[in-house]
Image: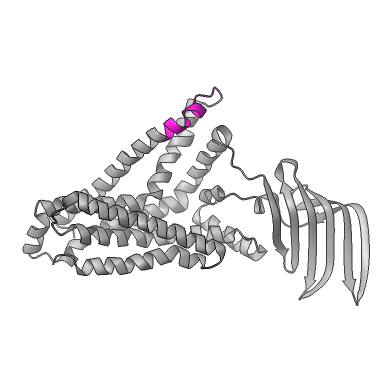
Amino acid sequence: MFTTIDRYILRQFLGTYFFSILLILSVAVVFDINEKISDFLKPEVPLRAIIFDYYLNFIPYYANLFSPLFTFISVIFFTTKLAENSEIIAMLAGGISFKRLMRPYMFSAAVIAILTFLLNSFLIPPANKTRIDFQNQYIKNRKMTYDENIQMEVQKDVFVYFGSYNEEINTGYQFSMEKFDGNRLVSRLTAVRTEYADSGHWMVHNYVINNYKDMKQEVITGRTIDTLLHIQPSDFLVSLEDMETMTTPQLSKYISRQQERGVGNAKLYAIELHKRYAAIMTAFLLTVIGLSLSARKLKGGLGFNIAIGLGLSFGYILFTTATSTFAVSGSMSPWMAAWLPNFVYLFIAAYIYTRAPR
């Protein structure tokens, strides 16, 4: 059961959180309109699409993206006000322990964490698709239609390679397909050009097949052959924005499929998947740090606490960016890249908590 004080803190926490989101995103929308006004004024861009396809999906995306920052600042803002009004001191003097005082904070953090995870996993991805489609159509087309040095395993012991692929003409160049029996190469098909037909079928032109059997080599040449590869261009023509359009189950399935095929971009998607789960813990950590920092009445007041809060928040963002870079380069696993900032901030939270007023 929640006491009157619990309900008061819940209202203050969640009210400040949603108000800060509304305030900051209102400013962000104004700046975004100013940046894109020349694109929006084009006659082919309908006003309805700007409002409902772009901004209606822009707002939840950025609200969720910066949710940890909003959480941290909200806790620091209203808790500092409580401390300045001696309300924290009164609560502690009235027999409420600091641990008990944390209960409504942790409940509020749980509400934010669950809401953030559900939005990030199921609701925002389809909204992102609409927003990104609008950007590609009317602002700047970033849809990936060309790639180079594509290599993947299409089925067990069968590997394909494209020197380059252009989706606009459905054509790949410098194509090769190799079949292995264990570590032994049994067949190699090479071609100057290949075209995607449909349903995994590829038309290979001017091909050469080398079959290796019993220390002998058989060479077969031809003009055109229909080959079933069990892949399609969408399997390798994937931009970084595409992972933002995938729900968490879709992202997990995509990662498994790409890892089986040996596609290098699977690491980026694995980092995104682990970040979605790590964000749950982040809400609790930043709440504990924010409360422990702000509960003591300091000479610097609100400005000092917000300065520390912003420093820790941006430090967390930079730390996350750095670990993601290490994971992409292969120096760190995607799981560690997503969770290491939380583990470091767990120790920071524990240290600051021990110095909080009792």
Q: Position of residue 231 (x, y in %)?
A: 71, 55
Q: How is the image coloured?
A: one colour
Residue at (58, 34) in percent of width and height: 137
Q: Is residue 182 left or right of residue 320?
A: right
Q: Is residue 279 left or right of residue 221?
A: left
Q: Quadrant of residue 113?
A: bottom left
Q: Quadrant of residue 212?
A: bottom right
Q: Position of residue 191 (x, y in %)?
A: 84, 55
Residue 289, magenta (yes or no): no
Q: Which region is colored magenta?
A: 32-43
Q: Is residue 189 left or right of residue 331?
A: right
Residue at (15, 59) in percent of width and height: 296
User: In this view of the protein, can residue 245 be seen by the observer?
Assistant: yes
In the depicted structure, whether residue 274 falls above or below residue 67: below
Of residues 357 and 52, which is closer to you in this image? 357
- Main SS, magenta region, reads helix
